[in-house]
Image: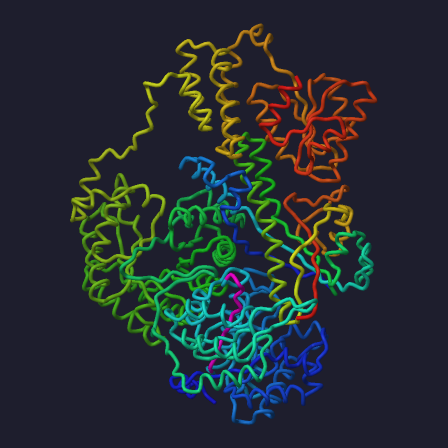
Amino acid sequence: MKPKVFKNIVVAVAYKKIYRRLGYRDNLTRLSLAQRNKIEGYINEALGLLRVKGMSLRLRITKNDCERILLSQRVVFKSKSLALLLRDSREALLMAVTCGNKIMRAIKKYTGGDDMVAAVVFDAVASEVSDAGLDWLMGYYNQQLLREKKYLTSKRFSCGYGDFTLENQKLIYRLLKLKSIGIRITRDCLLIPEKSVSAVAGIKNNI
Amino acid sequence: MDKKTILRFLKKKVLLLDGATGTQLFSRGMPHDVCPEAWCLKNPEVIKSVHADYQQAGSDIIYAATFGANRLKLKQFGLTNVREINRKLTRLAREAVKNKTMIAGDIGSTGHFVQPFGDLGFEDATDIFKEQIRGLLEGGADLLVIETMMDIQEARAALIAARELTDKFIMVTMTFDKTGRTINGTDPRTALIILQSLGADAVGCNCSTGPKEMLESIRAMKPYATVALVAKPNAGLPKLIGQDTVFTMSAREFSALGKRLVAAGANIIGGCCGTGPAHIAQLRDRLKDVRPLLPVRRSLSALASARKSVIIERNKFFVIGEKINPSGKVLMQKELLKGNFSYLRSLALVQQQAGANFLDVNVGAVNVDENKTMEGAVEVLSVASDLALVIDSSHIKTIESALKIFPGRALVNSISLEDEKIKKLLPLARKFGAMFILLPLSGQGIPRSLSERKKIIKKIYSRARRFGFTKDDIIIDGLAMSMASNPDYGRTTLKTIEWASKSFKSSVVIGLSNISFGLPNRAMINAAFLALARKKGLNLAIADPAVLKAFPNQAAKKIRDPAALVKYFSQVKAQLEAKKPNKSASIESQIAKAVLDGDKDAVVSLVNSGLRQGKNAYQLIESTVIPAIIKVGDLFDKKEYFLPQLIASAQTVKKAFALLKPQIKKETFAKDNKSLIILATVKGDIHDIGKNIVSLILESNGFKVLDLGKDVSAAKIIAAAKNYRPSVIGLSALMTTTMLRMKEVIILAQKQGLKTKFMVGGAVVNATYARSIKATYAQNATEAVRVIRKLT
């Protein structure tokens, strides 16, 4: 089974969410029009640099003994919390999303060039967009699965959370062929560009 | 059965579709994870019984079981005989229902997103659909249905492919989720506008939601529909019962809501997932004597991107953003030559934010491959912006490339009476459902008088009508020319606008900035002329939305003639008055305000001015700058400021320090110099934005910071500590795995006898963990300042 490529994910980002990520609180934070214009200028510039790509792969679950999940293609994940998430699932959906290199280069440029405001706004935009990218992938699969009388778990799990160790990212990286969408992985299992995220969700039958 | 007959039926009755095919096949023994089309061919009696049951229940139209019978879906099951499978399945449907019920050749998604949203090229997609449609037509389908589309571009590709092969009745239904949009953000009205302009005979929605939720979609479409509307909902929303998720809506409840769908404007109705013959039979009974609501419009003036549609009303005003045009813009030309579209994307968003309703896209420049570049630009803008595009090129091929891949309803800029253009562009605009700007040029020079312009407009319109265009599909160009050489040009433009709007009753546009070319104070002249033109009926302008916003057209209220307008503005000094500093406030309070406002440009001139006035640099730091940044920290802690404001203030302080510190006598500074802090993101962690913020805030509070960067080993941190003897070492980590490296650094420091104190922070770090490794925790940058003050 080959991973599915999503070349251009359309993520509708609410500016409000970006503001919240930066610490803005309704009815508390005071912002002048000039400051707001400047920040929104940065948000627009950041959005201009993003191209959200994704990969996904459906794998059959052959065994789940509450500690280890065995998948087709001889894939094994060891994690009690992931096993719990996938308890009633027949398949696992592996997915990853990246915002690309351009935004990271711009963040670096602004940090070095003495404009940290731009750097943090860019960082917040990219973080928000990468999360929204995974939401989009799950939304897409939920609609596709309906016709197969299947559906997706409402939650997803990422490496590094609970007992689902970061080392699993190497396996996900290989299975999803993330190199093909410009993602690298470090020795410490971090995805590069930094604003790249991966996750696992379950696919259940029964509708 | 032909299209005319179906259209005749639709005037008299609500047409009834079938219910779910998949649900019925599963309940009649089809296993999971098989190819449904191949299974139906192997079990013809089962699929025929499904069709026959729906016919029995009262369906006027049943769908052949060809939903996934396209090249890409069949390939997943190792099947390649696409045409044959479609032909056979359509014939099976005919055998089941004979000629008493109409058969729709069913076209579903390929499972791929189409360019610009996905990896499937637009032409590849149309080829794939054509292959399937040929099989359906050979099998004897009476009509076609393109259904369960979640990508408007895939629906466009399928519809364009179908229209190239047949003039049969075509229905297109999109699938909208609970938010009322497709996964890529297309709303029902937008889908309707795009699809009806491309020649769909009926448009609507199926799957994803139940009839109750679908009511909203039908209501949103009806006022704008020129075609019949289709509703094919699921049997409600799926519910979790025990371990099973099931559709629970009864046939009775479904049919009651079905009747409401018809009352909202649905002309063709059926059922999707979870429905069966019983649902259709109940619908038949309920709808027996119900008269359909016919489409309320014959045509509609509207443009759409994939995610937003705008109805062009003549009593409202719309701005077409003009800035995506490389003419005279060296930077844009360079970027386009490199094939880099980031700049275009930002320009689109900036214009959208400034109030543009549509975006003009022109990429013509020396050495630029215009076709390829236009395609790239349209791809990027379709994803980045919500605004419909105005395709601006003098090359027919370039316009065609853009219209093909733009996933909306575009506006062609423009079609004139020039022979080749009118011959080729009218059918092209028709094929891709575009509106067009009618440019009153004939290829024999610019028509100077209104009467010449009127003649050309009428000729072009008469030719356009032959292709089915109405006045709603065109926008007349008022042909604005520079008044620098002759103010009469302005008068003729105003007369053209008035005639086109009031007599010809069409929308009218001008390229606003043309009017002031070669004149002083262009922005003001443009704004004032715009006000005059709007009084004459202008409802669109190609202009810079930011400039329109910045220059309210006060003068136009008094001036009624273009010549007077030029004279008026030629005499005006248009320089905007720069903000004058508040002279009554002391320099100290102005510097403090600049810090609070994060105004790093203002602080430079204020500090320089303070120093010229003989202010003591040390005092300015201690009594003005530091208290101001402390106040900023307090406001941040109270959430009255958020992160960008905190950082802007810190950067302002840094600028002030850079000017003030060199002025301070060394001995004065040395006696109160703050301690050195070493900062690092630990080994294995590449996230450094938080650490960089802490560094900046510490510096702006007067601390010296040595930032070792990210992914720094314990050995390197300890070596630096031995060398520089800092008061505190600050460590940052974002991941649970890398957080553990903080402990390694502290243990190494202890082993080497270093007494330095440690401060730690980062997304996953907390106070308990910090205590466990004998460090102090700081939650954010302002707390880091307090922690450092305590530790030093």
In the image, B315 versus B50, the foreground residue is B50
Q: Tell me which colouring the rendered structure shows.
A: rainbow
Residue B29 image offset from top left, x and y in percent: 71, 82
Residue B775 image offset from top left, x and y in percent: 72, 26
**What residue is rendered at 63% in x and 75% in y?**
B68
Magenta extent: B169-179
Q: Quarter holding the C terminus of chain B?
A: top right
In the image, B316 versus A79, the foreground residue is A79
Residue A102 image offset from top left, x and y in percent: 59, 44
Residue B737 image offset from top left, x and y in percent: 75, 40
**What residue is rendered at 79% in x and 23% in y?**
B749
Q: Is residue B142 above or below residue B733?
A: below
- Does residue B517 appear anywhere in the picture? yes
- Residue at the top extreme, as displayed: B667
**What residue is rendered at 61% in x and 50% in y?**
A131
Report which quarter residue A140 is drawn in.
Answer: bottom right
Q: Is residue A6 above or below residue B174?
A: above
Q: Is residue B619 magenta?
A: no
**What residue is rendered at 49% in x and 49% in y?**
B345
Q: Is residue B173 magenta?
A: yes
In the image, B508 versus B55, the foreground residue is B55
Query: How many marks overall?
Result: 0
In the image, B275 versus B579, the foreground residue is B275
- Left or right: B158 with respect to B38? left
- Does residue B200 appear anywhere in the picture? no
